[in-house]
Amino acid sequence: VAFFLRWSREGPQASPPMVRLRCGDDNFALLGKFRTGTAGYGFVSCDLMTEFFGRDAHVERDLAQTFETGQTVCFNVSITQGMPMVTEMSACLPDWHPTPSDVPLEIETAESVEPLQALDPEEPQQCHDEPSEPVEPLEPSEVSQLVA
Protein backbone atom coordinates (compact mmCIF):
# COMPACT_ATOMS: atom_id res chain seq x y z
CA VAL A 1 0.00 0.00 0.00
CA ALA A 2 1.28 3.47 -0.83
CA PHE A 3 -0.12 6.61 0.79
CA PHE A 4 0.66 10.17 1.75
CA LEU A 5 1.56 11.15 5.31
CA ARG A 6 0.22 14.15 7.13
CA TRP A 7 1.33 15.38 10.53
CA SER A 8 -1.18 16.06 13.26
CA ARG A 9 -0.86 16.68 16.97
CA GLU A 10 -0.92 12.92 17.48
CA GLY A 11 1.98 12.37 15.05
CA PRO A 12 2.15 11.04 11.47
CA GLN A 13 -1.06 9.66 10.00
CA ALA A 14 -1.87 8.01 6.67
CA SER A 15 -3.83 10.30 4.41
CA PRO A 16 -5.87 9.46 1.31
CA PRO A 17 -5.44 8.75 -1.48
CA MET A 18 -4.10 5.25 -0.87
CA VAL A 19 -3.29 2.74 -3.55
CA ARG A 20 -2.73 -0.97 -3.20
CA LEU A 21 0.50 -1.99 -4.92
CA ARG A 22 0.49 -5.76 -4.72
CA CYS A 23 -1.35 -8.89 -3.60
CA GLY A 24 0.20 -12.04 -2.26
CA ASP A 25 -0.55 -15.67 -3.15
CA ASP A 26 -0.29 -15.27 -6.95
CA ASN A 27 -2.97 -12.54 -7.03
CA PHE A 28 -2.77 -9.08 -8.57
CA ALA A 29 -3.67 -5.62 -7.30
CA LEU A 30 -3.81 -3.50 -10.46
CA LEU A 31 -5.24 -3.48 -13.99
CA GLY A 32 -3.74 -1.69 -17.00
CA LYS A 33 -2.66 -1.73 -20.65
CA PHE A 34 0.82 -2.83 -21.66
CA ARG A 35 2.90 -0.96 -24.24
CA THR A 36 6.37 -1.67 -25.57
CA GLY A 37 8.97 0.99 -24.84
CA THR A 38 12.44 1.59 -26.24
CA ALA A 39 15.35 -0.85 -25.88
CA GLY A 40 13.03 -3.74 -25.02
CA TYR A 41 11.55 -2.24 -21.88
CA GLY A 42 7.83 -1.76 -21.44
CA PHE A 43 5.26 0.25 -19.55
CA VAL A 44 1.82 -0.38 -18.13
CA SER A 45 -0.66 2.48 -18.36
CA CYS A 46 -2.88 2.52 -15.29
CA ASP A 47 -5.04 5.40 -14.08
CA LEU A 48 -4.10 4.73 -10.44
CA MET A 49 -0.36 4.81 -11.18
CA THR A 50 -0.71 8.01 -13.18
CA GLU A 51 -2.82 9.68 -10.50
CA PHE A 52 -0.59 8.62 -7.63
CA PHE A 53 2.92 8.69 -9.16
CA GLY A 54 2.42 10.86 -12.25
CA ARG A 55 3.75 8.12 -14.58
CA ASP A 56 3.15 4.67 -15.99
CA ALA A 57 4.60 1.59 -14.29
CA HIS A 58 7.94 0.47 -15.76
CA VAL A 59 8.39 -3.15 -16.98
CA GLU A 60 11.86 -4.73 -17.17
CA ARG A 61 13.02 -6.30 -20.46
CA ASP A 62 12.72 -9.95 -19.47
CA LEU A 63 9.05 -9.51 -18.54
CA ALA A 64 8.18 -7.01 -21.29
CA GLN A 65 9.28 -9.32 -24.12
CA THR A 66 6.45 -11.75 -23.32
CA PHE A 67 3.65 -9.17 -23.87
CA GLU A 68 2.26 -7.21 -26.82
CA THR A 69 1.36 -3.52 -27.02
CA GLY A 70 -2.30 -2.96 -26.23
CA GLN A 71 -2.67 -6.13 -24.18
CA THR A 72 -4.76 -5.83 -21.00
CA VAL A 73 -2.75 -6.97 -17.98
CA CYS A 74 -3.18 -7.41 -14.25
CA PHE A 75 -0.03 -6.65 -12.28
CA ASN A 76 1.74 -5.85 -9.01
CA VAL A 77 4.35 -3.14 -8.46
CA SER A 78 7.08 -2.16 -6.06
CA ILE A 79 8.47 1.34 -5.70
CA THR A 80 12.11 1.83 -6.70
CA GLN A 81 13.57 5.34 -6.38
CA GLY A 82 10.04 6.77 -6.34
CA MET A 83 9.06 5.00 -9.55
CA PRO A 84 6.51 2.16 -9.85
CA MET A 85 8.18 -0.99 -11.19
CA VAL A 86 6.13 -4.00 -12.30
CA THR A 87 7.17 -7.09 -10.32
CA GLU A 88 4.59 -9.59 -11.61
CA MET A 89 2.23 -9.35 -14.56
CA SER A 90 -0.26 -11.55 -16.40
CA ALA A 91 -2.56 -11.13 -19.39
CA CYS A 92 -6.21 -10.82 -18.37
CA LEU A 93 -9.64 -9.85 -19.67
CA PRO A 94 -10.58 -6.13 -19.66
CA ASP A 95 -13.37 -6.78 -17.13
CA TRP A 96 -10.99 -8.41 -14.59
CA HIS A 97 -11.13 -6.97 -11.06
CA PRO A 98 -8.38 -7.01 -8.41
CA THR A 99 -8.56 -9.38 -5.47
CA PRO A 100 -10.47 -7.57 -2.68
CA SER A 101 -8.31 -6.09 0.04
CA ASP A 102 -8.66 -6.71 3.75
CA VAL A 103 -8.12 -2.97 4.34
CA PRO A 104 -11.39 -1.23 5.27
CA LEU A 105 -12.85 1.02 2.58
CA GLU A 106 -13.88 3.70 5.07
CA ILE A 107 -11.18 5.91 6.49
CA GLU A 108 -11.69 7.61 9.82
CA THR A 109 -10.63 11.23 9.88
CA ALA A 110 -9.99 13.42 12.90
CA GLU A 111 -12.33 16.40 13.08
CA SER A 112 -9.82 18.35 15.18
CA VAL A 113 -6.95 18.32 12.67
CA GLU A 114 -6.16 21.83 11.53
CA PRO A 115 -5.11 22.41 7.91
CA LEU A 116 -1.44 23.17 7.30
CA GLN A 117 -0.61 26.83 6.78
CA ALA A 118 2.51 28.49 5.45
CA LEU A 119 4.66 29.87 8.26
CA ASP A 120 6.02 33.40 8.22
CA PRO A 121 9.79 33.10 8.83
CA GLU A 122 9.73 36.49 10.61
CA GLU A 123 7.09 35.37 13.11
CA PRO A 124 8.26 33.41 16.17
CA GLN A 125 6.62 29.97 16.18
CA GLN A 126 5.47 28.05 19.23
CA CYS A 127 5.35 24.27 19.44
CA HIS A 128 3.27 22.40 21.98
CA ASP A 129 6.40 21.34 23.85
CA GLU A 130 7.82 24.85 24.13
CA PRO A 131 7.31 27.00 27.21
CA SER A 132 4.78 29.80 26.83
CA GLU A 133 7.32 32.40 27.98
CA PRO A 134 10.28 33.52 25.82
CA VAL A 135 13.54 31.64 26.30
CA GLU A 136 16.75 33.62 26.60
CA PRO A 137 19.40 32.75 23.98
CA LEU A 138 22.45 30.82 25.16
CA GLU A 139 25.86 32.41 25.41
CA PRO A 140 28.55 30.93 23.09
CA SER A 141 30.32 29.31 26.08
CA GLU A 142 27.04 27.59 27.10
CA VAL A 143 26.57 26.26 23.55
CA SER A 144 30.08 24.75 23.47
CA GLN A 145 29.33 22.98 26.79
CA LEU A 146 26.19 21.42 25.26
CA VAL A 147 28.05 20.23 22.15
CA ALA A 148 31.00 18.74 24.06
Image (tube, rainbow, N blue to C red):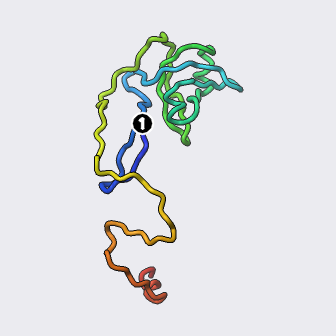
Image spot of residue 101 (x, y percent): 33, 26
Residue placed most toward the observer, 133 or 88: 133
Look at the picture and state if 6 lies above or below 120.
above
Q: Residues within 10 Å of mark 1 (few under 14, many from 20)?
A: few
Residue lying at 60% horizontally and 23% vertically, measured from the top left: 62
Task: Tell how many labels.
Answer: 1
Q: Where is mark 1, residue-wise? A: 17
Image spot of residue 45 (x, y percent): 57, 24
Image spot of residue 135 (x, y percent): 38, 81
Q: Secondary structure at mark 1?
A: strand
> Is residue 97 shown left or right of residue 67?
left
> Is residue 113 shown left or right of residue 18?
left
Residue lying at 52% horizontally and 20% vertically, measured from the top left: 32
Residue placed most toward the observer, 25 or 68: 68
Q: Quadrant of the N terminus?
A: top left
Look at the picture and state if 110 lies above or below 38.
below
Residue that lies at the very extreme toward the right in this rendered image: 39
Residue placed most toward the observer, 129 or 34: 129
Amino acid type, callout 1: Pro
Q: For residue 129, what is the image quadrant?
A: bottom left
Q: Quadrant of the C terminus?
A: bottom left
Image spot of residue 46 (x, y percent): 53, 24
Residue lying at 29% horizontally and 51% vertically, measured from the top left: 112
